[in-house]
Amino acid sequence: MDRTFVLAGAVAGLIAVAFGAFGAHGLRGRLSPDMLAVFETGVRYHMYHALALLLTAALMPRFPGKAMVAAGWLFVSGIVIFSGGLYPLTDKGVTILGAITPIGGVALLAGWAALVVATL
């Protein structure tokens, strides 16, 4: 499972850097400053949690168990739902996705909580 989360973290980091570059160079003139800030928030949380996935994978041998696995999957789902909801919201104006981003935020919070539980 730790290999899965290393792979997921590496792919998520790669996508976060690509989206960050796209936002900085491709969206700067196309989006309002407010929408660009929302996009940048998505990229920032995307990268933070790509790193959290790598941390989870690194800690798995030391703190094995269901809580650590749950933390990894919660980080994956949080990235997809939170950041994945913000990107089309800002670029395409798909407002329905703005309603589901809080679910992604809760998944990210739950991932950190699961990491705490795993280490106790």
Image (cartoon, helix red, strand yellow):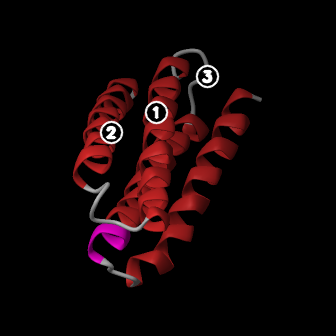
Q: Nearer the viewer, mark 1 or mark 2?
A: 2
Q: Where residue 42 sits in the image (x, y, percent)?
A: 45, 54
Q: Where residue 19 sits in the image (x, y, percent)?
A: 28, 46
Q: Where residue 120 sits in the image (x, y, percent)?
A: 77, 29
Q: Nearer the viewer, mark 1 or mark 3?
A: 1
Q: Which residues are magenta?
A: 88-92
What residue did someone put label 2 on?
12
Relative to 119, is 86 on the left or the right?
left
Q: Residue 29 lies in what quarter of the image?
A: bottom left
46 and 60: which one is in front? Answer: 46
Proximity of marks 1 and 2: CB atoms separated by less than 8 Å: yes
**48 vs 43: above or below:** above
How far apart in space, not on screen, are marks 3 and 2 (Cα)? 23 Å
Residue, x 52% and y 28% (percent of image)? 56
What residue did someone put label 3 on?
63
Label 3 crowd bin: few (<14), some (14–19), many (20+), radius 10 Å:
some
11 and 95: which one is in front? Answer: 95
Disc 3 element: loop
Q: Quadrant of the N terminus?
A: top left
56 and 21: which one is in front? Answer: 21
What residue did someone put label 1 on?
53
How far apart in space, not on screen, are marks 1 and 3 (Cα)? 14 Å
Relative to 98, is 59 on the left or the right?
right
Kindly tell me whether residue 73 is visible in this rendering: yes
